[in-house]
Image (cartoon, rainbow, N blue to C red):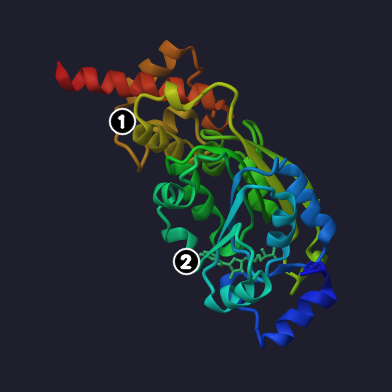
Amino acid sequence: MENKIATPSETKKILREHNLNLKKSLGQNFLVDSNIIEIITAAAEIQGDEFLIEIGPGIGSLTQLLLEDLDSGKLLAVEKDAAMVAVLEDIFAGEERLCLLNQDALKINWEEVAAEYNPENRKIKLIANLPYYVTTPIIMGVLESNIELEQMVFMVQKEVGERICAGPETKKFGSLSVAVQYHMQPEIVHQVPASVFIPQPDVDSVIVSLTPYQENIYQEKVISKKFFFQIVKSIFQQRRKTLRNSLSKSAVINLDRDLVTQALEDEGIGLKKRGEKLSISEMISISNRIYKMRNNAETN
Ligand code: SAM
């Protein structure tokens, strides 16, 4: 394929030739600006020998440039819409480095996929212009899996990207920020206007890059991941309340008020402080302390 797919004219031509109607229900807003695609691929710092995973390739605008950057590596593209897969098979016929998987990315077992398609254990990078109706479950599904990611670069709607990257003491800091930052370090790479898509979505977008932490600053420190995320949920469900109130009146976990008070005092955290002002490390410390105190109380 010589022509760049990511132009309005080429995209319209492919859709016309293949008799395709875009499905709003599948978040089919296609990128028609190759500069934006180049920003995505540059952010992924592709060396050429990686195992790349693309979610939602559509008619292949991003796929095309990923393949240009790949040398001996492989690209696995997961697309839910069989009609798109048929187009991709046509456009990229004979391209041996590309594997097309006609599946729902939400239902994929990423460990099994990596074992099957990446037996060489190449470094894994996930790159995507995500369908916006399922952005969060797709990202979390990959992060919660046990595959080791070298990098993740994806386009999401601006609001979601900002929430992913938000830090303590900001309005957008919430459960999603903690859930993602617990695994990887996020950064907004670029702001993207709605005008570079066909059809144009109602919202602007951002490109987000996630990279692994140099050292494991969160995961290894958490005693019980389940309990930690219950604490996080309680904190943000009642974010205007003091930490003592949000934890002791939590609908998520049943915690004794005296125990919460003691734990906060032991951690040197003011009883009136709001949970949303805590850093992730502080949330981990308080969750570990309450977890241990509760267990001790139960065994005594
Ligand atoms: N990569 C193309 C681009 O940048 O122009 C298309 C991106 S479009 C925003 C999202 C794509 O994800 C669509 O092709 C859509 O069919 C696909 N998709 C939607 N839901 C999906 C799911 N659950 N699993 C895999 N692909 C999905």
Label 2: which secondary element = loop
Residue 272 visible at all:
no
Q: Quadrant of residue 89?
A: bottom right
Q: Which mark is residue 37?
A: none
Q: Residues within 10 Å of mark 2 (few under 14, many from 20)?
A: some
Residue beneath the point at 68% across and 56% down: 157
Label 1: which secondary element = loop
Q: Earlier in the sequence, mark 1 or mark 2?
A: 2
Q: Nearer the viewer, mark 1 or mark 2?
A: 2
How far apart in space, not on screen, are marks 1 and 2 (Cα)?
Answer: 42 Å
Residue 140 visible at all:
yes
Pinpoint residue 161: horizontal percent, then vertical percent: 66, 48
Image check: 236 left or right of 48? left
Residue beneath the point at 81% across and 75% down: 10
Q: Where does label 1 land, which residue?
A: 255
Residue beneath the point at 14% across and 15% down: 300
Q: Which sits in the foreground, 37 or 170?
A: 37
Q: Which sits in the foreground, 296 or 52?
A: 52
Q: Residues within 10 Å of mark 1 (few under 14, many from 20)?
A: some
Residue beneath the point at 70% across and 40% down: 47
> For the residue marked with disc 1, what is the amino acid?
Leu
Q: How many marks?
A: 2
Q: Quadrant of residue 79?
A: bottom right
Decide if ligand 1 comes within 8 Å of the CB at mark 2: yes
Pinpoint residue 137: horizontal percent, then vertical percent: 49, 54
Q: Where does label 2 land, which residue?
A: 103
Q: Which sits in the foreground, 99 or 41?
A: 99
Q: Quadrant of residue 130?
A: bottom right
Pinpoint residue 38: horizontal percent, then vertical percent: 80, 52
Image check: 69 left or right of 258? right
> For the residue marked with disc 2, what is the amino acid?
Gln
Residue 151 vs 107, above or below: the answer is above
